[in-house]
Amino acid sequence: MDSNLENAKQFLSNGDYNKAIDAVNNVIASDPNSAEAYSIRGFARALNGETEQGLVDTKTSYQLDPNNVANYYNMAMVYKLAGQLEESKQWFEKVLTKDPNNTWSIYGIATIYADQGDDDKALEWLATAIKIDSSVKVVAAEQDHFERFHENSVFKSLVLP
C-alpha cells in the first residue's frame, strides 16, 4: 500500500494524473479510510480537470483526518482550480496556522490577490514568500498570475536579479 502512495505522489509530481489516480484507487480499494489517498486523488482529479470530484475527495480526506495539513494545501489548490478563490485563500491560511512559513501557501495567497486585482497585497505576500525561499522568484516570473506585473517596479525589484 505504501508503494502505491509513493508511486501516486511521483506520478502527481510528473504530471501523470491518470496514473496517480489509478495508484491511489488501489490504496482506497484496500484501505477505504486512507485520508492521504483521498487527498492525493482529489488533487490529481482537480489537476486533471475534474474539480468537483477533486473537492469531494479532499473533503472526504478532511473528514477522515481533519489534522492532515498536507490536505489543507491540496484543498486550497483544488478550490483554486475550481475558481473559488476565497475558499482557496481560507485553506491556504489554515495551512499557515499550522506551518507559518509554508512558502507555497504564502505564494498561493499572493497569486489569489494578483488574480483578484489587489496588487499591493499580491506584492506584499509575494515578498514574504521570496524571503522564505528565493526560488519563488523564478516561478513568479513565469506564471500568468504575475504577467501583468512585469513592468511594475516593485515586482521587478522582488523578482529580477
Image: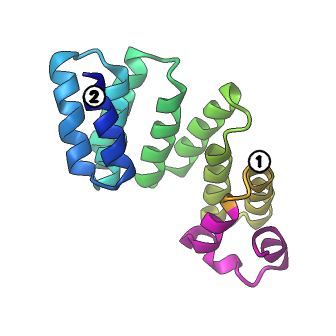
Percent x, y of residue 82: 40, 52
The disc labelled 1 sits on which kind of residue?
A: Ile
Answer whether residue 41 is visible to the viewer in this image.
Answer: no
Percent x, y of residue 52: 30, 44
The disc labelled 2 sits on which kind of residue?
A: Ser
Residue 25 relative to residue 87: left or right? left
Residue 151 relative to residue 142: left or right? right
Quarter placement of the N terminus: top left
The quadrant in which residue 144 appears is bottom right
Residue 129 relative to residue 157: left or right? left
Q: Residue furthest bottom?
A: 151
Residue 86 vs residue 139, the one in the foreground: 139
SS of the residue under disc 1? helix
Residue sitting at x 67%, y 25%: 98
From this view, report whether residue 110 is shown above or below residue 141: above
> Which residue was labeled with disc 2?
3
Q: Main secondary structure of the magenta part?
A: helix
From this view, report whether residue 129 is shown above or below residue 68: below
Residue 71's mark?
Answer: none
Answer whether residue 51 is visible to the viewer in this image.
Answer: yes
Percent x, y of residue 23: 21, 36
**Which-is-in-front pick, marks 1 and 2?**
2
Residue sitting at x 27%, y 53%: 16
Percent x, y of residue 136: 67, 59
Residue sitting at x 84%, y 73%: 157
From this view, report whether residue 97 is shown above or below residue 54: above
Range drawn in magenta? 137-161
Q: Is tag 1's residue or tag 2's residue first in the polypeptide sequence?
A: 2
> Which residue was labeled with disc 1?
132
